[in-house]
Amino acid sequence: MVVGVGGVTVGAEPGAGQPDRAGTGRVTRREMTRGLLASAAALALAPLVAASRPVPSTGMPTGTSFDETYRGRRIHGVLVPTEGRAVGGGEWQVTVDGRPLHLMRRADGTWLSMVDHYSSYATPLAAARAAVDEIGPGQRLRDLAPGPMGGGHMHMGGGHGVRA
């Protein structure tokens, strides 16, 4: 540090020789202008940054249906709207080679099939592909068993009526 005439330091760090503003709580016009310009620039760039980000995935295939051939099997799925569900909700009806594959939505938003009900998949299409992998090349999905989903009468055994 070099001391010049009148006790003012010369050749020292920038701002040396000026009164210390720490603790005064004052903001200069230059600092205020910089802050306002930085805020205006951030507001102007926000729409550009938001538009450049990818759209978050909903976990659903695009659209309300899919139809593809996977490993030689035809997978077809259609989202059927159901009453009482949230907007965009519904039930997926999926078939593999024309036979129904039952899917179920889990609480975390993933899907499982009745063929492979120990694993979860992000989309109904992914669950159907995994079911095809599990079925294997020479096998087919079974027809529906009689019951509420198959349209027949579900018989649980025992007689019809009360026995004493």
Image: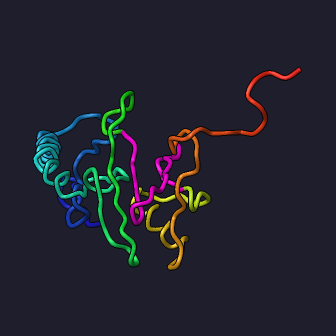
109 falls in the magenta region: yes
- In the picture, the quarter occupied by the N terminus is bottom left
The residues colored magenta run: 90-113
Residue 62 position in % (x across, y down): 27, 55
Quadrant in the picture for residue 67: bottom left
Which residue does the image show at 49% across and 52% down from the upper left? 102
14 and 130: which is toward the camera: 130
Left or right placement of residue 142 versus residue 74 in this view = right
Which residue does the image show at 48% across and 70% down from the upper left? 132
Which residue does the image show at 32% across and 51% down from the upper left? 78
- In the picture, the quarter occupied by the C terminus is top right
112 and 146: which is toward the camera: 146
103 falls in the magenta region: yes
Vertical relation: 73 (above or below) 150: below
Vertical relation: 149 (above or below) 161: below
111 and 132: which is toward the camera: 132
Which residue does the image show at 27% across and 42% down from the upper left? 21
Left or right placement of residue 115 versus residue 4 in this view = right
Vertical relation: 29 (above or below) 5: above
**Number of dots carrying numbers:** 0
Query: Which secondary structure is most common in the magenta stretch?
Result: strand
